Amino acid sequence: MLYLDRKEFRNYLQGQYQKNLYELISNVEGIQVSLSKSRVTASPKQALILFSDIWRQASIAQDKLNSLPINHSAIAQTTKFLTQVGDFCFALLKTINSGQSLSEADMNTVDKLTDFAGYLNNELHQLEREISEGNIDWTEIKNAGSSMFRRNLAETVDMKFERIAKELQEYPTLIYDGPFSENVLNIKPRVLKEKEVSLEEAKRIAKKIIGEDRVESISIYSDKTSDKVPAYALSVKVKGRKGDDINIDISKNGGNLIYMLDPREVGKQRIKIEKAVKIGLKFLEDNGYKSMIPTYSLKYDNVAVINYVYVQDKVLIYPDQIKLKIALDNGDIVGIEAQHYLIAHTKRNIPKPRITASEARQNVSQKLDIKNVRLTIIPMESLKEVFCYEFYGTYKGEKYLVYINAQDGTEEKILKIIDTPNGELTM
């Protein structure tokens, strides 16, 4: 009976990894098709829809790629490609939304991205065929290390992604590094100053986060000990659940929660976004992320994606942000991304503003009907942080955020808030 149970579990696990690979391929195909369509559309409205789809699919593809039992260093370049494709298309959304036309350079980049997305799509389909033909077994790869056969299987998949990485390196200046993506990730992670925890301690932390009564077993799904934020990448088998293991990364320094993905199917929405926001705040508080407030939320497939930002001395610290994905059927936390927070978070020496909010208001367009003002620290492309007043206002029914330097009155940044069917986006 035990042998049959193990065999059944192996088959289910193989099916789950195959499902994640299929969804990865599906989203990469979607990226390729939408990029291709964007080259021939003459409608700004249609371009907005296409680039929005690419941005969304790139995020999903990253989640699916990271859920596979593949050495993290082997997929790092592919993950970065997906991240930056999303960032580039987000930048194009900003350009189109401002009423500008895309440049010839932009369209040349879209051409190259389409070609590479096609190459990635073909490589992933080849991997899928090898698995379908029985040449590669995900469950053997997951347990790589216990035998030469398993190590060889793992190396086969790693080599495929390393070959993809080499192809990507042919386009060193291809990708746009958006102002909201890699500016924070480029600094030395401040969490590295914290004391290291052992693997067993990391497992205990993961068990506490997910719920000790829910955890059946914990294993390692990937090697992330050499990442920018070194981590123990753990796969948690949930009691009473066949497959759909939860992937959770605990930082080697400090034992902090970095990343989590619960791939379970989410049912019909039963709770409102407002309640999900409160659930997320309590979860962060319970897991050591205190003084956080929600800044925006989106909804996809009955899952709320909510961004939380750290507050120090009543000042919003935008570099210190955490993204939660909350299932709207029962309020479960099904996704966490806290890398930005762990890289940037520190106790800051916040100066007193040299100018008042009223004085800063003089440097904001008088056309803007101001609804709210608050102090913030924002990350700039130069990797510096700037202390600003954030003015939220409207003009002709459209919403904007204007950032005025609290020390010298300089207008540092303007963001436009776009209402979408899934929530608000800032551009």
Image (cartoon, helix red, strand yellow):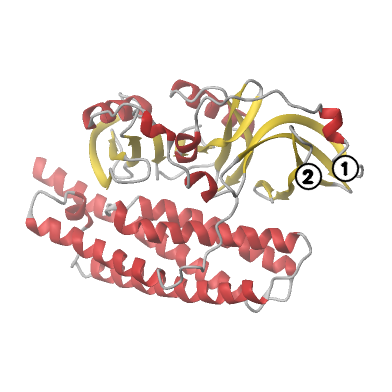
Q: Viewer-proximal residue, 135 or 79?
A: 79
**Residue ranking furthest to the bottom:** 40
Using a 10 Å C-alpha cutoff, classify the residue at mark 1 as few (fewer than 14 neighbours), some (14 to 19) or many (20 or more).
some
Which SS class for mark 1?
Answer: loop
73 displayed left or right of 149: right
Using a 10 Å C-alpha cutoff, classify the residue at mark 2 as few (fewer than 14 neighbours), some (14 to 19) or many (20 or more).
many
Residue 124 picture quarter: bottom left
Can residue 236 be spotted in the picture?
yes
Residue 369 picture quarter: top right
204 displayed left or right of 392: left
Residue drawn 26% across the image and 46% down it: 221
Q: Viewer-proximal residue, 117 or 282?
A: 117
Q: Viewer-proximal residue, 43 or 197?
A: 197
**Image marks 2 and 1: residues in contact by CB distance under 8 Å:** yes
Q: What residue sits right under mark 2 in the picture? A: 400
Q: What residue sits right under mark 1 in the picture? A: 368
Residue 114 rendering spot, x and y as whole percentages: 51, 74
Image quadrant holding the N terminus, namely top left
